[in-house]
Image (cartoon, helix red, strand yellow):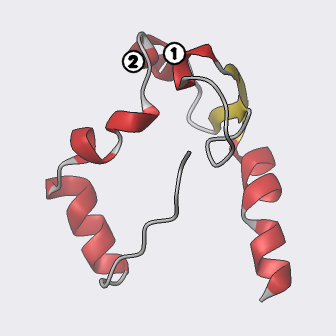
């Protein structure tokens, strides 16, 4: 199950990590066989809706349902509810 990972750094530290950090290690639990070709097929404004979600109990990621959806839909589903609670 995915867990929120907090960092002590700010936005610039996050960007620095994105360009210089161990992204392969960081995302190793969130990749499945063939993920590269599936990601390559996405448009720039798309992402994957995974069911059951990564934060929920479920089978291995490669066996979960994945569908390409607009990023706006993912943002609405996952980010906007958090904004309303703050």
Query: Residue sitting at 81 percent across and 57 percent down?
Result: 76
Q: Quadrant of the C terminus?
A: bottom right
Residues under labels 2 and 1: Cα distance?
6 Å
Quarter of the image where one finds residue 29: top left
Query: Residue sitting at 74 percent across and 47 percent down?
Result: 74
Whole-percent x, y for residue 28 in the image: 32, 35
Q: Quadrant of the N terminus?
A: top right
Query: Residue most toward the left?
Result: 20
Mark carried by residue 53: none
Count all numbered tags in the image, as a single digit. 2
Q: Check whether the beta carbons of the residues at disc 2 and disc 1 lie within 8 A of each other.
A: yes
Whole-percent x, y for residue 9 in the image: 30, 83
Whole-percent x, y for residue 4 in the image: 51, 64
Residue 16 as seen in the image, left or right of residue 55: left
Whole-percent x, y for residue 58 in the image: 67, 31
Query: Residue sitting at 69 percent across and 44 percent down?
Result: 56
**What secondary structure is found at the residue carrying circle 2?**
helix
As rendered, which of 3 and 84 lies closer to the eye? Answer: 3
Residue placed under numbered mark 2 in the picture = 36
Residue placed under numbered mark 1 in the picture = 38
Number of residues whose C-alpha sits closer than 10 Å to that of mark 2, classed few (under 14), some (14–19) or many (20 or more): few
Q: Is residue 45 above or below residue 85?
A: above
**What secondary structure is found at the residue carrying circle 1?**
helix
Quarter of the image where one finds residue 70: top right
Number of residues whose C-alpha sits closer than 10 Å to that of mark 1, classed few (under 14), some (14–19) or many (20 or more): some
Query: Residue sitting at 81 percent across and 53 percent down?
Result: 77
Q: Is residue 31 above or below residue 56?
A: above
Residue 16 as seen in the image, left or right of residue 84: left
């Amino acid at each position: 199950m995915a867990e929120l990972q907090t960092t002590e750094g700010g936005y610039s530290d996050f960007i620095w990590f994105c360009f210089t950090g161990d992204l392969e290690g960081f995302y190793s639990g969130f990749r499945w066989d063939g993920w590269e070709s599936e990601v390559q097929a996405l448009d720039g404004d798309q992402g994957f809706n995974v069911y059951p979600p990564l934060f929920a109990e479920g089978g291995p990621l490669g066996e979960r349902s994945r569908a390409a959806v607009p990023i706006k839909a993912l943002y609405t589903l996952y980010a906007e509810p958090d904004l309303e609670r703050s």
